[in-house]
Image (cartoon, rainbow, N blue to C red):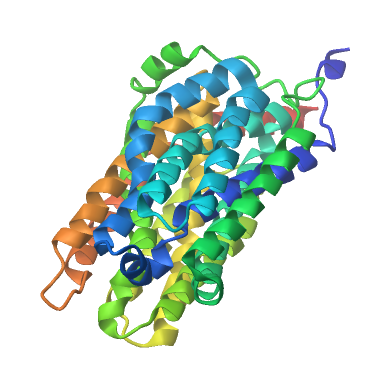
């Protein structure tokens, strides 16, 4: 009789696929200008930092919208909470294309998209908890995060070619059309929850404010927030300045776009490997440590490589280990912070990374050498990544995933 209270539905994969499409679209819109920073600055007759601000605005706005977005997701559910962000994404993705000749309208549209972003990004673990059993959630989160990387790959690789062929306004109109298609698919196929929950481990969560207070009492969550502050900040800074970062070493915008794509492809492959292994072996901490240790050589290679193939290899290596740690960390946070709501724990991690992203982006620009090299601050980021590795050894393994495994063995 007890087993009939829980069920796993095949439709969960359709929900995850459509949700992942929206994740990818949002990241594509965010990263659009990163591989063409110099050309966009010339087209709009503004400074490169003003083009960098278009991506950085997402991080600034996130600071103010993250908590309201997490509250909305926890209170109103996936379809309504995330749906609000999806509607905003459609509106401002379209206006950015329609008024792509004017930097002011592009900036306003990017700010509108930035408001929408937390409603989409903060919901990964919440959606996984609604539709997936515990032993599949890191895998499901990995697929959603992988979709973000796919969106960044499209933005990094396609933007230089589209902007050359159709001009920057034409490229923005193409992305606006893709956005509208994604919005329509979301409202056609997304359901708020299955008829029955997928498991019994953590079906009850506290309210937003209670969950927030609980999180700040947990040592592992404090450490995790610091780790995400460093890790996501590094990721945001590198993806924002990728073209300016390697241009002083003689690389062009096509090569910058390719590097960005290779970085994300590494992340995509890593998400196919690391989160499923974490689920299969019922281990979170071990994979977080491994990923942080093995991502360090990739960051070092991006900082110092002067050969193009070595640069690409470093990008792939960094992407594979660094980015695939994200979904494992999200799920680990949801487990160790129980009974705090999933969107609250994930929102806090993302908020920390957006704040550091702003700091690191300004730091990379401020500490440029006379030749324009960003290597001085990249060295600082390498040191911070080593600190992250040390912090990862201080967290404890998730007891929830172990308890779920023991229950399955006893049945």
Camera-side residue of 319 and 58:
58
Closer to us: 158 or 205? 158
Residue at 78%, 35% in the rendered image: 188
Vertical relation: 228 (above or below) 261: above
Residue 57 appears in the rendering: yes
10 over 251 or under it: above or below = above
Q: Where is residue 350 in the image (x, y as percent from the top left)?
A: 41, 38
Residue closest to the eye, 254 or 343: 254
What residue is drawn where x is 56% and y is 52%? 148
The quarter in which the N terminus is drawn is: top right
Residue at 32% across, 70% down: 42
**Number of callouts:** 0
- Name the residue furthest left: 370
| Horizontal and vertical percent position of residue 127 | 64, 32
Q: State the residue in front, 345 or 253.
A: 253
Left or right of 143 on screen, residue 300: left
Q: Residue at x 73, y 46 (%)?
A: 17
Q: In which quarter of the image is residue 68?
A: top left
Left or right, 273 with reference to 186: left
The answer to whether 305 appears left or right of 18 in the picture is left
Expressed as whole percent of the image width and height from the top left, the position of residue 58 reads: 39, 43
From the top left corner, tell me how far across and down residue 310 is, in percent: 41, 83
Looking at the rendering, in which quadrant would you find the C terminus? top right
Q: Does any portion of residue 300 appear in the rendered image?
A: no
């Amino acid at each position: 009789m007890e087993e009939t209270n829980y069920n796993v539905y095949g439709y969960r994969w359709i929900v995850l696929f459509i949700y992942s499409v929206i994740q990818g679209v949002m990241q594509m819109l965010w990263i659009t200008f990163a591989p063409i920073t110099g050309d966009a600055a010339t087209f709009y007759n503004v400074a490169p930092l003003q083009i960098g601000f278009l991506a950085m605005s997402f991080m600034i706005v996130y600071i103010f919208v993250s908590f309201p977005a997490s509250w909305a997701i926890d209170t109103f559910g996936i379809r309504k909470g995330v749906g609000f962000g999806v509607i905003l994404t459609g509106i401002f993705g379209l206006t950015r294309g329609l008024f792509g000749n004017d930097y002011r309208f592009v900036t306003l549209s990017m700010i509108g998209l930035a408001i929408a972003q937390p409603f989409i990004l903060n919901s990964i673990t919440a959606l996984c908890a609604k539709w997936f059993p515990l032993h599949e959630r890191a895998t499901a989160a990995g697929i959603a995060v992988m979709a973000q990387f796919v969106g960044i790959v499209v933005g990094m690789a396609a933007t230089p070619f589209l902007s050359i062929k159709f001009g920057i306004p034409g490229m923005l109109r193409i992305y606006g059309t893709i956005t509208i298609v994604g919005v329509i698919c979301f409202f056609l196929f997304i359901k708020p929850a299955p008829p029955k929950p997928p498991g019994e481990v953590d079906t009850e969560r506290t309210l937003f404010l209670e969950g927030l207070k609980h999180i700040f009492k947990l040592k592992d969550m404090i450490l995790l927030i610091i780790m995400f502050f460093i890790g996501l900040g590094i990721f945001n800074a590198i993806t924002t300045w990728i073209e300016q970062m390697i241009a002083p070493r003689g690389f062009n915008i096509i090569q910058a776009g390719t590097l960005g794509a290779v970085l994300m492809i590494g992340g995509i492959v890593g998400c196919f490997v690391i989160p499923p292994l974490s689920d299969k072996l019922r281990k979170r901490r071990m994979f977080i440590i491994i990923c942080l240790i093995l991502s360090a050589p990739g960051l070092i290679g991006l900082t110092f490589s002067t050969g193009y193939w070595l640069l690409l290899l470093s990008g792939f290596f960094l992407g594979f280990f660094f980015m695939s740690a994200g979904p494992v960390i999200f799920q680990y946070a949801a487990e160790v912070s129980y009974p705090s709501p999933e969107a609250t724990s994930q929102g806090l991690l993302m908020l920390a990374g957006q704040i550091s992203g702003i700091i690191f982006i300004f730091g990379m620009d401020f500490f440029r050498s006379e030749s324009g090299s960003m290597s001085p601050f990249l060295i600082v980021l390498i040191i911070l990544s080593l600190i992250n590795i040390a912090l990862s050894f201080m967290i404890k393994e998730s007891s929830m995933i172990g308890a779920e495994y023991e229950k399955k063995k006893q049945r």
